[in-house]
Amino acid sequence: MPFFPPQLTTEHLNQLNARTLGEQIGIEFTEIGADYLVARMPVDNRTHQPLGLLHGGAQPTDVYLRIY
């Protein structure tokens, strides 16, 4: 049984992501299938901490936005 409805598209998900934290940190949905979702998040000045490493809160935010 498919988890995502067939009419759901990455374009629709990215529109829903507009003006949210996900958009602010650059999360973009790139692929969707019946039972999977692919998104990408850049590691840049929006998501790294002062030492240049990925901020500890960025990765859970990415996962949270994919789930909800």
Image: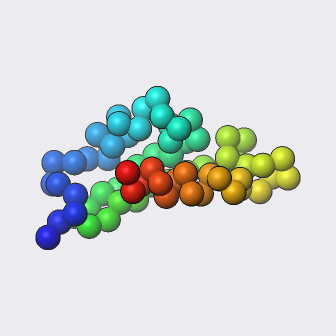
In depth, the one of 29 and 2 nearer the eye is 2
Q: Which residue is rendered at x = 52% and y = 53% of the image?
A: 62
Q: Position of residue 25 (x, y in %)?
A: 58, 41
Where does the image place residue 40, in percent across and percent down from the top left?
50, 54
Where is residue 24, by image quadrant? Answer: top right
Judging from the image, the colouring scheme is: rainbow
Residue drawn 14% across and 70% down? 1
Report the residue that reaches farthest toward the top: 19
67 vs 11, left or right, is right
| Residue 14 vertical placement versus 65 (above, below) | above
Q: Is residue 48 visible?
A: yes
The answer to whether residue 30 of the structure is visible from this angle is no
In the rendered structure, the answer to whether residue 57 lies left or right of residue 20 reads right
Q: Horizontal placement of 14 versus 40: left or right?
A: left
- Residue at position x 25%, y 47% in the image: 9
Residue 58, x across and y down, in percent: 62, 52
- Name above or below for residue 29 compared with residue 11: below
| Residue 11 higher or lower than 32, as above or below | above
Q: Nearer the viewer, residue 1 or 44?
A: 1
Q: Residue furthest bottom?
A: 1
Residue 23 percent across, percent down from the top left = 50, 37
Question: At 38% from the left edge and 40% from the top edge, which residue is drawn?
Answer: 14
* Callout count: 0
